[in-house]
Amino acid sequence: MKIIIVGVMQEPQIAEIKGNFDSMKNIVGESIQINLRPHDSSALVRHSEGSWLELPIARKFYCNGELVDIVHGTFFVCGTSLHGDHFISLTDEQIELYMEKFKLSNCESGEDGNE
């Protein structure tokens, strides 16, 4: 399964994983939280206790210039099936979108592009 991994203070990277629970835990940690993004059939997968464990901030997300979410620790983005019930590889278009969206140079701007 082709994904994009985003680490703390690192540029996003394209990676291939098996797509099973263990391969996901190896990236984000033991406790997984999944945020579905139905508008583009993708999911953001992160450590569910990242904030509580005070993991370093990987990215901040803004909408209309307002901070709406902070992701602590390494996370990844993968594709989802039409109904969001299966994880699949990202499409080439999704890879292009998320590689740009998660560039370090785009992270602290508060622009709506990082929502």
Image: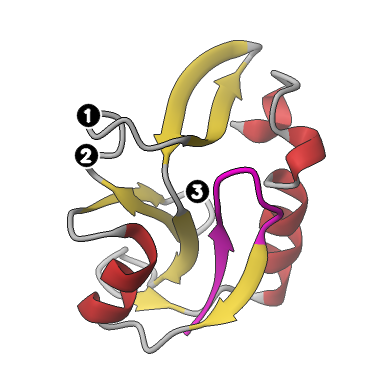
Say whether residue 4 is magenta.
yes
CA distance separating discs 3 and 2: 25 Å
CA distance separating discs 2 and 1: 5 Å
Coloring scheme used: secondary structure
Q: Residues within 10 Å of mark 1 (few under 14, many from 20)?
A: few
Classify 89 as above or below 101.
Answer: below
Q: Is residue 24 left or right of residue 102?
A: left
| Segment tinted magenta in the rendering | 1-12
Residue 112: x and y in percent read: 69, 24
Q: Identify the residue under disc 1.
A: 52
Q: Identify the residue under disc 3.
A: 39
Q: Is residue 83 left or right of residue 32?
A: right
Mark 3 or mark 2: which comes first in sequence?
Answer: 3
Callout 2–callout 1 Cβ contact below 8 Å: yes
Q: Residue at x 27, y 59 (%)?
A: 29
Q: Which quadrant holds residue 91?
A: bottom right
CA distance separating discs 3 and 1: 29 Å
Q: Residue at x 22, y 76 (%)?
A: 21
Q: Nearer the viewer, residue 106 or 85?
A: 106
